[in-house]
Image (tube, rainbow, N blue to C red):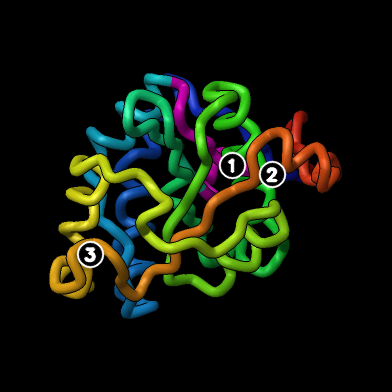
Amino acid sequence: MKSFIVEIAKEQHFKYAEPICQLIEESAKQRGTGIAKRKPEYVIKKMAAGNAIIALYGDELAGFCYIEAWDHGKYVANSGLIVNPKFRKNGLAKKIKAKAFNHARATYPTAKVFGITTSLAVMKINSDLGYKPVTFSELTQDDAFWKGCQSCPNYDILQRNERKLCLCTGMLAPSQEEAMKLDLSHQIVNNPVS
């Protein structure tokens, strides 16, 4: 029987870029909420830089997430978390997000790790990883980050509120020191997931 493999995406995964983008777009339509659209070239760029996590079931795309640094590495966002609908409801999103979180911590040890989302499921996953809701003023102020929200159907809300609030909730992970105090070691995913 096959099992899920959750790993850092590599060149051999470039072929999944188009299906990942389609999955993101379909999910946004189904939910009727904001998920920023991404192009396959953008996803490939994240994979090539070693900043993407992919989940596979055999050769089938099961899920995806990527990390991106802002403000010269002071902030790192976990973005684009998506799970193929046929593989939902089995904890895969949490495994992908935990892998992305640990990869962000390892790659950018002093950065503030954050995410923004409208998804209750993602908020719960983030909470389990120690993230706390914060105002947008506690997140990166890098214009390039907020420009990525332009493809979201809620972008006008963000603009109208001068990037202070939107339908998304901003969530900030604990620093490494705070995480050690909270003992989130049970959240660490180091090996491929079965």
Question: Is residue 55 shown in magenta?
Answer: yes
Q: Report the magenta stretch's main SS.
A: strand
The mark that comes first in sequence, 2 or 3, is: 2
Res. 153 in view: no
Task: Please state the extent of the stretch shown in magenta in the rendering.
Answer: 50-63
| Pointer 2 with pointer 1, Cβ within 8 A | yes
Question: Is residue 103 shown in magenta?
Answer: no
Residue 34 image point, x, y percent: 31, 69
Q: State which quadrant residue 55 falls in.
A: top right
- What type is the residue that disc 1 sits on? Leu
Task: Specify whether 5 is left or right of 20.
Answer: right
Along the line of sight, which residue is nearer the eye, 186 or 52?
A: 186
Residue 73 image point, x, y percent: 41, 26
Residue carrying label 3: 152
Nearer the viewer's eye, disc 3 or disc 1? 3
- What type is the residue that disc 3 sits on? Cys
The residue at 23%/33% (across/down) is: 41
Residue 98 image point, x, y percent: 66, 44
Residue carrying label 2: 4
Residue carrying label 1: 56
- What type is the residue that disc 2 sits on? Phe
Q: Is residue 68 above or below residue 130?
A: above
The residue at 66%/62% (across/down) is: 127
Q: Alpha carbon of mark 2 to alpha carbon of mark 1: how far?
A: 6 Å
Q: State which quadrant residue 67 falls in.
A: top left
Along the line of sight, which residue is nearer the eye, 101 or 137?
A: 137
